[in-house]
Amino acid sequence: MAITKLAFLVDKPPYKTETSRLALTHALSSQSVEIYLKDGDNVEPFLAFIGDGVLNCIKNQKALTIYDVTSLDMHIRNALLFGLNVYVCKEDIRKFGLTEDMIVMDADHPDGELKTQIVPYAEIEQAIESCDHILFF
Amino acid sequence: MKLGIFVSHFRFNTDTYERLKAERLGVIFVQNGIYHATLRENGKSSPLLEKPAKFYVLKDDLETHGFTNSQVDSRVKVITYNDLVDVIFNEYEKLAWL
Amino acid sequence: MGKLTIGTFSSLIGSMSLDFALRLAEAAINKGHKVDFWVSGNATMLSKKAQRAYRDYSFLEKKVKELIERGVNFTACEACSEARGYHKEDTMEGWKRHNMDWYLASCFDSDRVLHIGGE
């Protein structure tokens, strides 16, 4: 029985490339990874948005309405709904002049209790230290 | 933490690079990252080499870009793909590609 | 000997990251390591059969076939492939196609994971 911790780190902004979308879709796929693993084994991913990556976390994105593609904030909501820890770098939010009320903070769903954690980079660093593998997007 | 960072770009936002820290840190220059191991822009070596880390540059990418071992900064070790496998398995537990 | 999982989403043409990744995979199996090779996003182009060799473009089909023969486990993201019009019948022999969870499962028991992002 083992748990492998995976850090999904995103420092690219959304939409221009597929990069941050792939970070989210790969992380979300952890929901079904058990089919490949022995009973009791699992992976435990977390998502951390740093640098330009925090721009993925701005709420009210209209990609679905305008371009008919799932918006990145929808994926972040799903990540929270499925119990993935989502960290957003506090210093970078401030750097861009964003405020916390502009950030996706919850799953916006009755079953979603987990909140986005806006934390200093030092806390994200600790999470990186404690993971087994880094997937840098 | 033992962390190996792959640098594949020449011009890029170095904020993340500067933030990444580890007890044992290695930086492997590949693709256009090799310019950090070779160029002295305006007479100065790359600021990326100021990080407290071991530095490596991939020989095949160095030569692909028109450089030779003799043009590599003395802080940087030239390695082959075979060496790189050993660096990955023996020196660093976690890997990040920038 | 260990297990190396390489994941990438860089395209076959327009980036040299797949060239790098295949050479690294080859060097790893030469040293007796096991290699899982995952492609998603634009990198699923690598799984397409009947690539034609031109000197101005990376031609990696031959190298992939050699590495499949030598035991490298190549897997492409099924949804990423289908979204690009690469269907099962377009895929090179020896490739597997799975959901993204396969990659995470590969990471689970891997000694080293190199995820080549940065695009």
Image (cartoon, coloured by chain):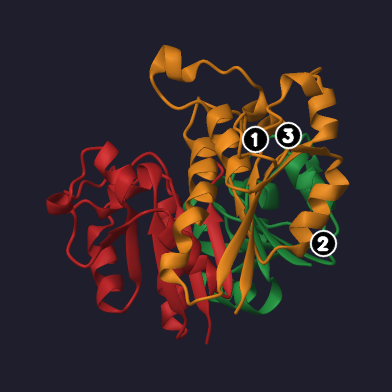
Going 42% across and 79% down the picture, which residue do you hit? C29
Circle number at residue B22: 2
- Residue designated by label 1: B11
Q: Which chain is orange?
A: A
Q: Nearer the viewer, residue B84 or A7?
A: A7
Percent coordinates x, y for residue A94 in the rendering? 84, 24
Going 73% across and 34% down the picture, which residue do you hit? A51
Circle number at residue A51: 3
Percent coordinates x, y for residue A40 in the rendering? 56, 75
Mark 1 Cα within 10 Å, few/some/many (few <14, many 20+)? few
Q: Which chain is green?
A: B
Q: CA distance from mark 3 to mark 1?
A: 16 Å
* Residue B32 seen from this side: yes
Letter of the chain that mark 1 sits on in the rendering: B
Letter of the chain that mark 3 sits on in the rendering: A
Q: CA distance from mark 2 to mark 1?
A: 23 Å
Q: Nearer the viewer, residue B83 or A62?
A: A62
Q: Colour of chain C?
A: red
Circle number at residue A4: none
Mark 1 is on which residue type?
Arg
Mark 2 Cα within 10 Å, few/some/many (few <14, many 20+)? some
